[in-house]
Amino acid sequence: MKKYTPSRLSRLPIKWKLTLWSSVLLFCVFIVYNTVQYFFVEKWMIHQEEQATEKTMREILNFALEREISFEGADLDEMRGFLQKINQQDQRIRILDEQGNPVAAVSNGIEDSLAATITGSPHEQWRSMHVKGNLLLMERPITIFQFDGTVEIVKNINEFEQLSGALFQFMAIGCLVAVIISGLGGRMLARQLVKPLQAMNQTMKNVKQKGLAERIAFYDNHDEIATTMNMFNVMMDKVERSFQQQRQFVEDASHELRTPIAIVEGHLGMLHRWGKHDPAVLEESLQISIQELARLKALVEELLALTRAENLQMDEATAVCEPEQVILQTIKKVNVLHPAFIMERDLRELSGVRLAISVEHLEQILLILLDNAVKYSRERKRIAVQATVQKERVCLAIKDAGIGIPAKDLPFVTDRLYRVDKARNRKSGSAEGNGLGLSIAKRLVERYNGALSIESIEQEGTTVNVFLPIRAGVQ
């Protein structure tokens, strides 16, 4: 494979690239504008000279025709006087006979040798006006009685050429000034465009030095750069939250795993030192070790279940054909384990509905939520399960009359290994679990494009709402 070698331009910093390209763009715009303006002015000035010459020609022809000049004797003298009167600076007027010999001629500042450079040069016969060098030639035929001749006007437009040259020099100087202004303007433009990127770069350095709490300060004017900076801040919020959750998870998991391991290690050490010879101590230590190992095994299994829930790949073809039966069977299983509880259900709206979730995962979610409802109910052993259809999704509400969740803890109960009251012993309330059940349920629901919400009033009860999409195309 051929190795890519970047060009010198591509190796430049973006600031200099913006400066260079903006300068070139501004310079090109100025050059094009001045070029168009120069040629427009030049054409306009030539047109003005042509119109002035055309006017002089009409005056000569009108004068000759009105007076029916014979171009002889006194008429010829009158014609010369008129030509002398209307002739302008740097202009020669001649009236030629049929053989091309001058009958009357006046000149003001233009020599015959200079005029001969255009009158003697070949030119298109069908055109009445010609421009060559600094001279303008106009010819018109004139016929009066037996006279058949030509009126010829030669005008020196040297002043126009000088003015055009001065205009060109002025525009050339303007182009040089435009190069300088374009460079400065491009530099300022590049600095303004790169400033947000520099702010992002500085924020990244601050994140590296000071931590994930650093953010970009910007004014949201709803353009692309502001949107990018806002997305950077949003991304950093998610990264910071993810790191905090990861750190909290590692700390909680370490604590949860350390406790049973320490208990088992203590009892095994005690048995190794002296307890193995005492049957009562041996029995007690083995029983406690088995319980702690069972709790450790349950914790590891829940952590694996959470990992699988987070990495779940949803199968679009998976659907629950009869969710009502799955829910009833799950309630029956929980009721067998906890016969003291009254399980109320209202699932009438689920008739003929298919849910976009597998049977196993729906059952797992219900078991987690019903198990939590049982654990937190205490004296009021009544749990209600209700299903309602809301447009394109189903809402499953699991409501208990238990101890409830404090408002300050409600936003965090779905975090991994979070328990409402860690100070309580494991025989009361939420301390019986590992704090992973709701996390697993929430991840499973979200993997199927659903949602899980919790409403709770302390000492009155908790309602968990599970929203699952309905599988389309079913009658």
Image (tube, rainbow, N blue to C red):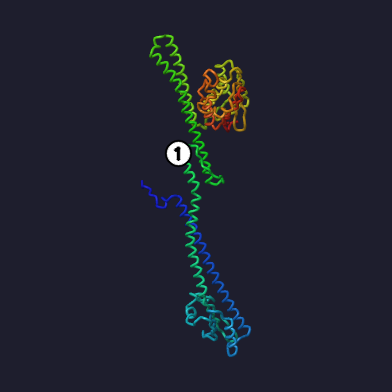
Residue at the image position 50 percent from the left and 56 percent from the top: 185
Rendering coords of residue 148 (x, y %):
56, 84
Q: Is residue 243 above or below residue 85?
A: above
Question: Can you say whether 456 is above or below 335 in the image?
Answer: below
* Vertical order, 275 against 398 (above or below): above
Answer left or right for 16 relative to 400. left
Badge 1 is on which residue? 209
Residue 99 place in picture, x, y as percent: 51, 85
**Quarter of the image with the C terminus in it:** top right
Count of numbered marks: 1
**The furthest residue to the front:** 210
Residue 16 is left or right of residue 143, and the answer is left
**In the rendering, at what x and y percent does residue 1 appear?**
36, 46
The amino acid sitting under disc 1 is Gln
From what the image shows, is residue 136 above or below residue 392?
below
Rendered residue at 51%/77% (across/down):
156
Q: Residue at x 48, y 65 (%)?
A: 173
Left or right: 67, with 41 as reference point: right
Q: How dense is the environment of label 1, judged by Cα within 10 Å: few (below 14), some, or many (20 and up)?
A: few
| Left or right of 386 on screen, residue 265 | left
Secondary structure, mark 1, is: helix
Q: Residue at x 50, y 53 (%)?
A: 188
For the residue pair 380 and 340, the one nearer the viewer reads as 380
User: Could you say where residue 104 lies in the image, as x and y percent from the top left?
Assistant: 55, 86
